[in-house]
Image: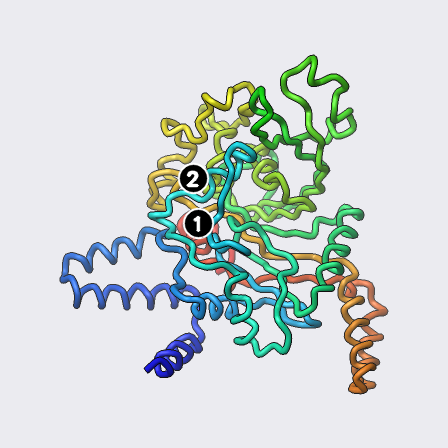
Amino acid sequence: MFKRQILFVFNRNSIPCSPLSRSTTTSSLNSSTNVDDNGRQYKSINKQSSAKHLYRNLFDWHSHLDLAKLLAKNIVYNDYGLIAISKPWGLGIHKPVDVVNARINPSNAEQMLNNQIFGHPKYSIASVIDLLGQLMLLNHPLHIVKAPDRRWSGIVLFSEQKTMENLILKSIRQAKSQLIPPMRFYCIVNGLIPNVEIGRWYEERCGIRLTDIDELGQSKEPIYVSPNEMSKNIRKSGAHRDNKYQLGPVKSAAIKYRVLAQNPDLAVSLIDLHTTVTKWSTIQCFLAYKTSFILGDTFFSYRVKHIFGQHITMATLKQKRLANWRHIDQSFEPLSRKVCQKLNVRSNREIPLMIHHYGLLLPKLLRKLKKQKSSSNNDSGQTNEKNLIKMNERQSDNNCDDLIIHTNVNHLPKHFYHTLERLDLNIFR
């Protein structure tokens, strides 16, 4: 009986289908099952929830095998011993549940909310990595090389060799030294960035600084550092004597961004953002300074307010004591009523963080991988002369030395894709 169930699961998931067809098929199956079990009234409620609630039960895997097969379907790159997989939102890397200390970093404290809507995350990538290697028929165990935040969806890098991590990190450091943003993201934001043209690239060299928001220094908050302030002294001498709040070190970032689509009626946008730094909530903090906050961001959304339709950036929480500071002000809702109605949510807290890590640029990495592969082939005596000639021709071109990993439209999360549809921002049709 167990073997028949396993075969049925493999055969059912081997049928190729688009994300839209999978969602419609799932909803139709759920509606027919509910009619048989609970009658006509429950069927109508299920249709309404499946049609309107985009963010209910996002963790739709129920076993290690389901999760491993889902990751195996989302492979976007597999060559030279390097594997890239687009992970779903909320999936942990090493732990299934994120334990966040609000006092240390309050910007991360309110991101994983409303488990009754999103569902409870089950398992993690580390718990199914061995099963994933078996499904891919690999000879060696997989290792996690580079992974994004659990609150993002997007690219996770795996390798069968632990030494691959050093090559990846060295390539990223090389990109940062050349001011080339290697990490690429899609962000759905509430707000319109002023004085920008749709489709035009803008580059900025800025910084992110952690500052104390309480007198005891137990809680810190990231703030934006403008390009003009980057040349100033980032730590004042004797700041602890003259000022209660010390100026922390600045982490410099090279950011390149463009607006892909806008909806002026709803004041929402789709932004393509490339950055060299993601630590200290750089993406959220930068966009908040641009009078736009990412949908589902429950911390930096309170820095952006609008007065008579004009979005402005508010001051930080610096002058408030930690004991009197409420992480979420229930009386203030950053989203407009139109956006809430379009997404069928009551507040911004019912939306997952809309950041998708869709691309990665690794300078000069492809040349090293080719050399490593050719040396291994020479050692085993299986080198093909034609392949070596083609490899040498490609190495002559510098553009072929950079490894660029991109996800396609089929690997966009379903909730991300349907959010673009609801807000009339979908350019991936």
Can you tell which quarter of the image residue 145 is in?
A: bottom right
Query: At 69% from the left edge and 18% from the top edge, which residue is drawn?
Result: 240
Q: What element carries label 1?
A: loop
Is the Cβ of the residue at disc 1 closer than 8 Å to that at disc 2? Answer: yes
343 left or right, relative to 145: left
Residue tagged 2: 266
- 376 vs 413, nearest the viewer: 376
- 374 vs 51, nearest the viewer: 374
Which quarter of the rendered picture does the N terminus lie within?
Answer: bottom left
Residue density around tag 1, few if under 14, some if 14–19, many if 20 or more, within 10 Å: some
Across and down, in percent, residue 126 comes to 54, 61
Which amino acid type corresponds to the residue marked 2 in the rendered image?
Leu
- 213 vs 349, nearest the viewer: 213
Residue density around tag 2, few if under 14, some if 14–19, many if 20 or more, within 10 Å: some
Depicted 193 relative to depicted 354: above or below:
above
Which amino acid type corresponds to the residue marked 1 in the rendered image?
Asp
Q: What element carries label 2?
A: loop
Q: Is residue 203 something that shows in the picture?
A: yes
Which disc is residue 424 wearing?
1
**Number of marks in the image?**
2
- The alpha-carbon separation of the residues under discs 1 and 2 comes to 9 Å
Query: At 55% from the left edge and 70% from the top edge, which residue is drawn?
Result: 130
285 left or right, relative to 40: right
Depicted 70 relative to depicted 196: above or below:
below
Across and down, in percent, residue 335 comes to 41, 35
Question: Hey, which residue is sitting farthest top in the picture?
Answer: 242
Which disc is residue 388 wearing?
none
Across and down, in percent, residue 100 comes to 50, 41
